Amino acid sequence: MSGPDLTEIVGTDHVLTSPDLVAAYVTDWTGRYRGDARAVVRPQTVDQVSSILHACNIAGIDVVPQGGNTGLVGGSVPAPGSGAVVLSLTRLNSMGPIDPATGQVTVGAGVTLSALHAHAHAAGWSFGVDLAARDSATIGGMVATNAGGIHVVGNGMMRKQVLGLEAVLATGEVIRSMSGLAKNNTGYDLTQLLCGSEGTLGVITEVSLQLIRPRDTELILAGCDSVAAALKIASRFAGRLAAAEIMDRSGIESVSRVIGIAVPFPTSFHVLVEVTGGVSADSLEDLEHVTLAMDARDRENYWALRERITEAMAAEGTGVSHKLDISVPLADLDTVYREITAYLDQPGVRDVVLFGHLMDGNFHVFFTTDADGSVEQALDTAVLELVAVHGGSISAEHGVGHMKADHLHLSRSAAEIASMRGIKAALDPEGILNPGVLLPK
Ligand code: FAD
Ligand code: MLT
Ligand code: ZN
């Protein structure tokens, strides 16, 4: 293999080139994006990351940063024929002590979300972001995609938990904003700039995070027959919501079939609402279909109905399954649901399932189309254009990746895209970091 000898930096065990070892790193979680890499390189320190990037930058070799490879927009794998290096950050998995006075902790980019949750809980703290891919998703990947998950309504997205970070730029230079200072108003916020940059501006190697104190919550499962009714149920707890999720009937029926738990209510929608500060009986008395989780088993079953939809749809996939991740203003959510499900009448469309983070205005839209995939592109464009008409976003929480780069103009202005290109050119002048991701070619 021509180009720099990266084994000198990380050792032969951590430069993978044989196809069987590389395979898992070049196909994304959905299976929709498959590329190839000249090598997978697995550094263990920031100095090794710096040396690798420096060498690749000089040689003009593309680098695809990768964490848990659970991304859903094709941003974590190289394009076919790219000759890129996949830079796996999973070995940067150290976790520092939790400061008992402030609840701050510094962790390596390769630490998984579930490892961080366990670390926080052991010290009487909690981490504000949670999502179903918790056993594989890494903190570096979650910062790079500004991940959302089930607790955004209560705790905000990933960027809100980030106090500072260390990253390596394409040239190999290391930047660190880990002072721990509560206040430091000295120029552009490079930490926040890298949140959501999807591996295109720098490789995140360490992150300083703010933990939160665990709170007692009640978990309500309710049934209703419209998105507007679902919003009414959740909004009555506004200001005390830890989570508010919606599942339409076809999604929950799929989970019921695949994992064998009964569908609780005969309604078109189920709503899962997690509330702090207690739930009074009279706050639910107008609801015909409602129940409160009485124990851990109830909680596990109720969350399974929501978190296992993706898995169930994949297991039952009878055609080409394809997912969008959109958000619109809450006032438009009911209308947008009806407009999207109307596509079910289109030839070639077999199923449309919507579920997601209700009070974030965020639907995950799962289409199953005829196996030839002929309608997929047209359907994507139609739905993303519909979302744009409602002032929504073509990507609520999963990022842009390769998947939506060509639709970026539907959510960002020409001036904004030009500004993003300027920033990219300044930080990655040779354009080696994740080319084709986020910014349209
Ligand atoms: P990867 O997939 O490895 O990479 C994602 C992007 O980040 C790529 O562009 C990659 O280049 C870049 N990247 C990775 N590590 C670094 C780094 N150290 N430095 C710079 N760039 C880096 N997402 C949500 O937002 N909300 C959800 O509720 C949610 N639920 C999910 C449920 C399931 C079952 C699955 C499979 C995925 C889900 N996701 C969700 C998507 C995914 O888990 C998130 O996008 C997560 O942040 C990706 O983390 P990762 O470590 O797997 O990153
Ligand atoms: C979720 O909320 O379940 C995730 O964003 C993943 C998905 O869309 O499947
Ligand atoms: Zn989600």
Image (cartoon, rainbow, N blue to C red):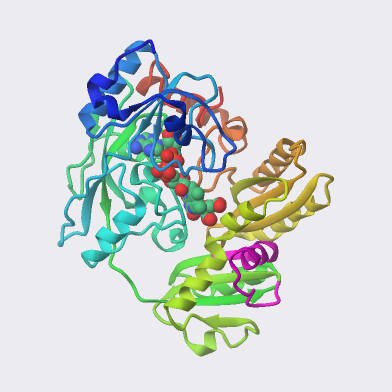
Q: Residue 288, image x and y in percent?
A: 65, 84
Residue 150 in the magenta stretch? The answer is no
**Of residues 21 and 289, which is closer to you in this image?**
21
Q: Residue 426, image x and y in percent?
A: 37, 21
In screen coordinates, is 226 left or right of 419? Answer: right
How many numbered discs, if any?
0
The structure residue drawn at horizontal position 71% and vertical position 36%, both measured from the top left corner, is 377
The structure residue drawn at horizontal position 47% and vertical position 44%, both measured from the top left corner, is 70
In screen coordinates, is 233 left or right of 107? Answer: right
Q: Residue 33, image x and y in percent?
A: 56, 34
The structure residue drawn at horizontal position 37% and vertical position 43%, both measured from the top left corner, is 143
**The C terminus lies in which quarter of the figure?**
top right
In screen coordinates, is 21 left or right of 441? Answer: left
Up-down relation of residue 407 to residue 111 (above or below): above
Point out the quarter of the image occupied by ligand 1: top left
The quarter holding residue 101 reads bottom left
The quarter holding residue 30 reads top right
Residue 189 makes an appearance in the image: no
**The N terminus lies in which quarter of the figure?**
top left
Up-down relation of residue 204 to residue 116 (above or below): above
Q: Which residues are magenta?
A: 245-267
**Of residues 235 and 380, which is closer to you in this image?**
380
Residue 16 makes an appearance in the image: yes
Q: Residue 32, image x and y in percent?
A: 60, 37
The structure residue drawn at horizontal position 50% and vertical position 20%, both measured from the top left corner, is 82
In screen coordinates, is 400 left or right of 178? Answer: right
